[in-house]
Image (cartoon, helix red, strand yellow):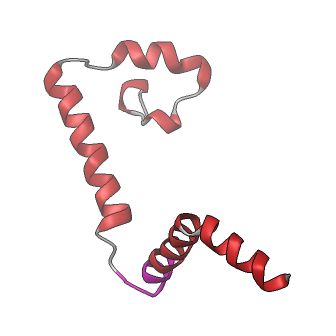
């Protein structure tokens, strides 16, 4: 494929300056690139086609870690007194 039609991940490091020279850096094209990146992010991580327990379990694990961090000082004092 011509250099101007390749994606960034398909461009070799030596071809990067020539590839950047072929890019269109107008505000409209930059906004379109940001919009395309946002849509691909949403389709990959937010609008998942199949759901499962992974998202809920990650949420619960994050809550457990966060609440442990909030209560660490209290927990460490209580556990110290239990072992004495």
Residue drawn at (21%, 42%) of the image: 35
Query: What x and y, as percent, mark residue 17?
Result: 49, 13
Quadrant location, the C terminus:
bottom right
Tell me if 31 is positioned left or right of 81 in this view. left
Which quadrant would residue 78 be assigned to in this image? bottom right
Q: How many marks?
A: 0
Query: What x and y, as percent, mark residue 61?
Result: 54, 77
Tell me if 71 is positioned left or right of 43 in this view. right
Query: What x and y, as percent, mark residue 75?
Result: 65, 74
Residue drawn at (46%, 87%) of the image: 53
Residue drawn at (42%, 37%) of the image: 7
Residue drawn at (16%, 21%) of the image: 27
Q: Nearer the viewer, residue 4 or 51?
A: 51
Tell me if 43 is positioned left or right of 63 in this view. left
Q: Nearer the viewer, residue 83 or 61?
A: 83
| Residue 40 vertical position relative to residue 33 in the rendered view, above or below | below
Question: Which residue occupies the extreme right position in the image?
Answer: 84
Q: Which residues are magenta?
A: 50-58
């Amino acid at each position: 494929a011509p250099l101007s039609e390749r994606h960034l991940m398909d461009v070799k490091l030596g071809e990067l300056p020539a590839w950047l020279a072929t890019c269109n850096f107008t505000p409209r094209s930059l906004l379109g690139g940001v919009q395309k990146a946002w849509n691909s992010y949403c389709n990959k991580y937010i609008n998942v086609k199949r759901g499962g327990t992974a998202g809920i379990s990650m949420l619960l694990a994050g809550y457990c870690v966060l609440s442990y961090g909030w209560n660490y000082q209290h927990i460490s004092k209580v556990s110290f007194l239990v072992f004495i």
